[in-house]
């Protein structure tokens, strides 16, 4: 088959097709009754180690011949895409098209750039001959018994005699197809008539040309346009030679090969057919651009215009790009090459593509019946039983019902019921005898739904009249709050039993240590129905008292609850070093002390250094020692708030205590540009400007205050000061400029001031004085 039209033709063809109109007698499309088959991972073979640009099938050797335009070679690969052998193309060229001879013995390829036609032994890929073809822009190949035919330029085709090497070029049609693009015409030879050759201009018109090549010069037999199909991508003869398929924009044009008569031609409609391939069994296949909204491969029986089978590529992201389509000549396999958005290629091998799968018969859906009725039912009275059948049965589904009991051990058939749209139903019955009655509910099943059944058994009782009991009510009054270890008094009254003294009531206390409750001594009522409870709760939190009357043969039982909020004791908790000041980098020991508690002896110590860049952190959690102490070491770099936390227990309340520890900044000042140092004084020439380099603990936005003093009148006096922003590393260098007096003593000091130096991360720190003087 002839195909591989240059992609630059496509855009022009689309635009032109929108502006042209062809009359066609019939159109066909994919059958709505065909269910597309989704290709699976088992049919996909990754293309590795080479790039596949076009292929042909060598069924004699059960392999594919693949043209690789990236590495300029032809490869023989098995049906799974594994490389068996390869041959490099001469002069770094690419095979624009290639064909197998009818006996599969010779491989022919046309190489456009060096303008060669080359033949190889198809079995070994050993080169046989090279034939120069001095024509402009050679394109596609077709083979007949004695010649190699090729297309070139946009209005030409030629022939090569392999015996003599003679090349003859011919004008396509009248040579004046003004709509033709620069794409070479497609070309195909009849598989049954050695004297017939068909060509199609790969342009926006889709002209077809039928030639008789039996004479010395090809004779034009017929010409036509391919109906609504334009911008042709593929040209193919049917295996019996009686039909020509032309694939392009708008679908596949099907025309009789004998005359190209338009009144016998048909169009299979689709947005575009990128490739058309015919098998020897009469089937032909069309490849569409892979997309989620259409089938990607459509297969047709000979003479039919509706697809008999369809296939889809699995698409999870961007759709893959179609590369090539080929039948195994017998039609037993169909091969497709695609490229995904990453450039990875796949070889899809579809076995038995023309075998129509038998329609699957869906399995009957399982159903299940559930029944619900009362725990017991009186003899001789109506009992209502509700049921639900699941499985999506339709509304009105018949449900059959029967009852068995001691009077009817063989069962009694009851009226059938119908399920509603939700599968629900309800039936009523009157069991005639005491004992156990069992109802059996049955769904017979259908072709779509499986049968199911269920039973429910209910004891049938003879009711005895229940005497009417006098109701009783208990009321409790208690304080809302109390202290742990202090006595509380609860006043109670039972109503409904006021005129009977000595009525016993039980008392149960529930608290954090007795969640299941602790029984206190029972109380008895006075003749007026009152009673008093006195208790000393030893546990803090919510303490609940439950009072209950068990009832009698004439009076109903009753109970009541009352809760008291019992305050927990405050534990003694301290944390040392509050208000202390330490030098930068000092490691301090923080000690938490916990006084008496009940069971919990665990405390936590937290550190919260100044600034949002350091979060509050747990630095130690543990059980205090026998002295009630827990200690942890911590290195200070900033003002830090420490806290110790006691979570509390059932008798002592939770508590948190804090300790604020101040940390000085690290401050140093160095002098340079001096010529000597004697004891503590730096000596600087008056012609020099000394430099004073400050290094201070770094913090975002931090500033230093630089203080200069001079010695006069027997004491140090202020001379000049300045505030200067430090670098991110905490450094700043100040140069003392101006005219310098000799013989005067000076000193300089770097200072960090909390709140004034841009932050409060450290405690105010005064650096050491540095002394200097100027000389000649």
Image (cartoon, rainbow, N blue to C red):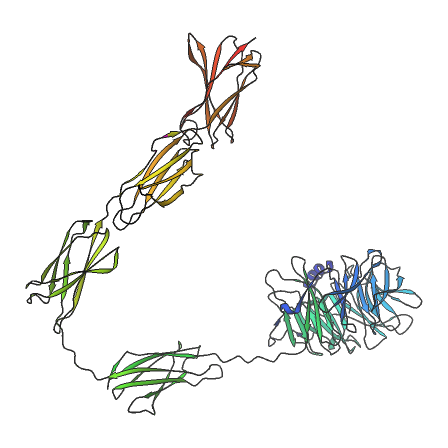
In the image shown, does 2 or 70 lie closer to the viewer?
Answer: 70
- Residue 677 place in picture, x, y as percent: 54, 15
**Residue 172: x, y in percent?**
83, 66
Counting the numbered discs, the total is 0
Q: At x 33% / y 85%, what residue is drawn?
A: 439
Tell me: 242 left or right of 668: right
Is 578 one of the magenta-colored residues?
yes
Region rendered in magenta? 576-580
Q: How far across and how far down the image is residue 758, in percent?
A: 43, 29
User: Is 344 or 222 nearer to us in this picture?
Assistant: 344
In this picture, residue 441 sits left or right of residue 270:
left
Q: Quadrant of residue 615?
A: top left
Residue 9, above or below 309: above
Q: State which quadrant residue 341 falls in.
A: bottom right
Instruction: Report the predominant secondary structure element of the magenta stretch.
Output: loop
Query: Which image quadrant: the C terminus?
Result: top right
Is 417 placed above or below 45 here?
below
């Amino acid at each position: 088959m002839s195909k591989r039209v240059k992609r630059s033709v496509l855009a022009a063809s689309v635009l032109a097709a929108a502006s042209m109109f062809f009359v066609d007698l019939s159109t066909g499309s994919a059958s709505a009754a065909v269910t597309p088959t989704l290709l699976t991972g088992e049919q996909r073979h990754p293309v590795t180690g080479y790039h596949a640009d076009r292929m042909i099938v060598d069924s004699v050797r059960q392999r594919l011949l693949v043209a690789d335009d990236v590495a300029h070679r032809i490869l023989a690969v098995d049906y799974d895409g594994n490389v068996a052998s390869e041959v490099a193309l001469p002069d770094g060229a690419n095979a624009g098209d290639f064909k197998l001879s009818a006996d599969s013995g010779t491989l022919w390829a046309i190489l456009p750039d060096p303008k060669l036609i080359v033949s190889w032994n198809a079995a070994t890929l050993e080169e046989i001959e090279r034939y120069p073809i001095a024509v402009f822009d050679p394109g596609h190949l077709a083979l007949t018994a004695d010649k190699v035919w090729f297309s070139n330029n946009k209005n030409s085709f030629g022939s090569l005699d392999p015996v003599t090497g003679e090349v003859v070029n011919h004008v396509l049609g009248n040579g004046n197809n003004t709509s033709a693009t620069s794409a070479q015409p497609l070309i195909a030879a009849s598989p049954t008539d050695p004297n017939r050759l068909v060509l199609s201009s790969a342009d926006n018109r889709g002209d077809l040309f039928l030639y008789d090549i039996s004479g010395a010069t090809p004779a034009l037999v017929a010409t036509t346009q391919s109906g609504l199909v334009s911008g042709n991508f593929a040209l193919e003869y049917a295996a019996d030679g009686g039909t020509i398929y032309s694939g392009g924009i708008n679908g596949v044009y099907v025309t009789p090969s004998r005359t190209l008569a338009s009144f016998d031609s048909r169009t299979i409609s689709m947005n575009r057919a990128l490739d058309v391939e015919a098998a020897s069994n009469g089937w032909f296949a069309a490849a569409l651009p892979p997309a989620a909204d259409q089938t990607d491969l459509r297969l047709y029986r000979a003479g039919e215009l509706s697809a008999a089978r369809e296939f889809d590529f699995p698409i999870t992201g961007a759709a893959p790009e179609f590369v090539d389509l080929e039948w195994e000549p017998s039609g037993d396999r169909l091969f497709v090459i695609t490229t995904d958005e990453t450039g990875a290629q796949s070889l899809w091998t579809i076995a038995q593509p023309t075998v129509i799968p038998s329609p699957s018969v869906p399995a009957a859906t399982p159903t299940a019946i559930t029944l619900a009725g009362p725990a017991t039912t009186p003899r001789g009275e109506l009992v209502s039983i509700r049921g639900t059948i699941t499985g999506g049965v339709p509304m009105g589904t018949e449900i059959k019902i029967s009852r068995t009991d001691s009077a009817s051990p063989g069962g009694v058939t009851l009226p059938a019921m119908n399920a509603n749209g939700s599968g629900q139903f309800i039936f009523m019955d009157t069991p005639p005898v005491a004992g156990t009655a069992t109802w059996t509910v049955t769904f017979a099943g259908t072709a779509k739904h499986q049968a199911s059944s269920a039973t429910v058994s209910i004891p049938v009782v003879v009711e005895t009249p229940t005497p009417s009991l006098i109701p009783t009510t208990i009321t409790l009054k208690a304080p809302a709050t109390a202290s742990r270890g202090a006595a509380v008094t609860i006043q109670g009254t039972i109503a409904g039993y006021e005129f009977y003294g000595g009525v016993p009531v039980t008392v149960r206390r529930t608290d954090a240590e007795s969640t299941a409750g602790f029984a206190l001594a029972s109380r008895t009522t006075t003749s007026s129905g009152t009673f008093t409870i006195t208790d000393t709760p030893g546990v803090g939190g919510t303490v609940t008292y439950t009072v209950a009357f068990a009832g009698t043969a004439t009076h109903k039982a009753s109970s009541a609850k009352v809760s008291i909020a019992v305050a927990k004791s405050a534990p003694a908790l301290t944390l040392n070093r509050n208000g202390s000041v330490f030098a930068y980098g000092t490691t301090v020991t923080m000690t938490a002390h916990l006084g008496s508690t009940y069971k919990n002896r665990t405390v936590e110590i937290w550190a919260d250094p100044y600034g949002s860049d350091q979060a509050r952190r747990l630095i130690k959690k543990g059980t205090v020692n026998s002295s009630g102490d827990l200690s942890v070491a911590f290195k200070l770099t900033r003002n830090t708030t420490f806290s110790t936390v006691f979570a509390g227990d059932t008798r002592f309340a939770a508590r948190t205590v804090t300790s604020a520890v101040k940390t000085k900044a690290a401050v140093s000042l160095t002098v340079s540009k001096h010529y000597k140092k004697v004891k503590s004084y730096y000596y600087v020439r008056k012609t020099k400007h000394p430099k004073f380099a400050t290094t201070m603990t770094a913090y975002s936005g931090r500033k230093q205050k630089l203080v200069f003093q001079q010695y006069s009148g027997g004491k140090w006096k202020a001379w000049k000061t300045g505030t200067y922003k430090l670098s991110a590393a905490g450094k700043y260098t100040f140069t003392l400029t101006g005219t310098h007096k000799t013989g005067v003593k000076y000193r300089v000091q770097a200072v960090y001031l909390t709140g004034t130096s841009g932050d409060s991360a450290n405690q105010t720190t005064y650096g050491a004085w540095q002394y200097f003087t100027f000389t000649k």
